[in-house]
Image (cartoon, rainbow, N blue to C red):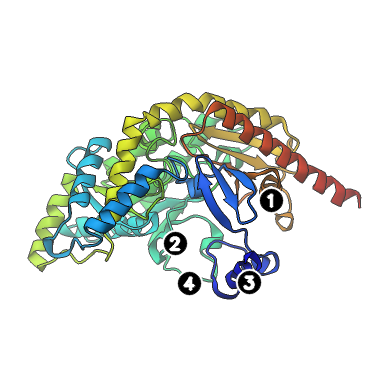
Amino acid sequence: MNASLEQQDLDHLFHPCTDLAGHSRAGPLIWSRGEGVYVYDSAGKQYLEGMAGLWCTALGYGEKELARVAAEQMETFCYGPLFAGKSNEPSIRLAAKLSEWVPIDGARFLFGCSGSDANDAQVKLVRYYFHAIGKPGKRKILSRGNAYHGVTVATAALTGLPAFHKHFGLAMDEVIHLTSPHFYRQGRPGESESEFVERLGQELEQVIEREGADNIAAFFAEPLMGAGGVILPPEGYFQRIQPLLEANDILLVDDEVVCAFGRTGQAFGCQTYGMRPATMTMAKALSSAYVPISAVAVPPFMYEPIEKAAGEVGIFGHGLTYSGHPVAAAVAVRNLELMEERGLINHAAAMAPAFQGALQRLADHPLVGHQRGIGLIGGLELVADKESRQSFPAAEKMAFRVAAACLEEGLVVRALPGDIVAVCPPLIIDPAQIEELAGKLERGLDRALKSVQATRSA
């Protein structure tokens, strides 16, 4: 049966974000079930899911209450679109619940299916808004190196990772990428962190002057960069750039897809880093990934002119078939309620010191050049030489070797561009499981180091 499944995978599935040629040779790892912070493969082997899937299964696996709500909603009312003013109870309740969570007074919520389509909608919304208030020239979008905002045509252009651009023929003309706030790699010799922040602030000033504030609509930013390498902003970064954005009427779009709902130890990453977002994008932990759903928080100052302009056209010409899907919305509502009932945000904050301490102990490992993290998210940047920060040759795929070694130890982590190993467990993780994660990660690093040493001595 398993061999047959593996062959069917190789014959019929098109895997996203995968080394397709390598997959053809190695075949799939097939998950069969999950429970709590653990997942099991088709051979029955247990793994600690150290990536919460893709930064998303906040409540962990096998949560029966979410399964119950989904089944109940399917039986009661399985689907109905929000088009043409029609609505459904779960979508209404989810919008009301989110209004209690987000730090944007009076926000309305536009629902979608993924972070990618939500950020794509953000691009359209900020342009629609500026058209509506008589500033149609404000179209350009600022993003950053190492940013990840999605994989649609628009959001892949915003993403600052070369692999998501190459061969796709993206429309990049109206996207401007600024320097990544990655002090470990982008800081200059002898430059302090505060000097680095000032340099990035001056870069933003120069870009605004060069492009013209009347041509720039928005600045997209994750509070911390997830898929780009678990890159935390240096101290004072957002405080330096936000006044420039506000003075030039450039909207700060807060991409909370990875950070929202407790990952950084607070409800939202913008609260952790003192951001003042105009709008917010949420997905992933919104439903703990039990069903696909995303949300865009739209402030009143944007919604009101959009409403007026749409009325003149006769329709607001944007929406997805599954916007506000009642099953997804019902699960998301219950997910947020469970987070409240179980004090999950406080639990994540309480677990953060032990988690970060466990990762910090690995900073001395011979493969680790830089360890970083906050809350229940962390990254290890691997280097061939600690002193010079020299990277491994790309062909060695060092982070992938570590991730594979961790799988052998029964731990799921993620290899990211730049030889970074990301760790992001379900928020329900407990102290004993944190120690288990750290031990397996250390043994995975040791395995990978031995393979490197063996290769070099051969």
Q: Earlier in the sequence, mark 2 or mark 4?
A: 2
Q: Residues within 10 Å of mark 2 (few under 14, many from 20)?
A: some
For mark 4, give the secondary structure.
loop
Q: Amino acid at mark 1?
A: Ala
Foreground residue among 384 and 426: 426
State the mark number for residue 119: none
For mark 2, give the secondary structure.
loop
Asked if 172 appears above or below 104 in the picture, the reply is below
For mark 3, give the secondary structure.
helix
Q: Earlier in the sequence, mark 3 or mark 1?
A: 3
Asked if 21 appears above or below 178 in the picture, the reply is below
Q: Quadrant of residue 256?
A: top left
Left or right of 399, for residue 308 = left
Q: Where does the image place residue 151, in percent across and percent down from the top left? A: 44, 61
Mark 3 against mark 4, which lies toward the viewer? 3
Q: Which residue is mark 2?
A: 151
Q: Where does the image place residue 393, in percent across and percent down from the top left? A: 73, 53
Q: Where does the image place residue 196, in percent across and percent down from the top left? A: 52, 36
Q: Which residue is mark 4?
A: 169
Q: Earlier in the sequence, mark 1 or mark 2?
A: 2
The residue at 20%/67% (across/down) is 317
Q: Which residue is mark 3?
A: 7
Q: Can you say which quadrant of the picture contains the N terminus?
A: bottom right
Mark 3 against mark 2, which lies toward the viewer? 3
The residue at 43%/30% (across/down) is 265
Q: Earlier in the sequence, mark 3 or mark 2?
A: 3
Asked if 39 appears above or below 4 in the picture, the reply is above
Mark 3 against mark 1, which lies toward the viewer? 3
For mark 1, give the secondary structure.
helix
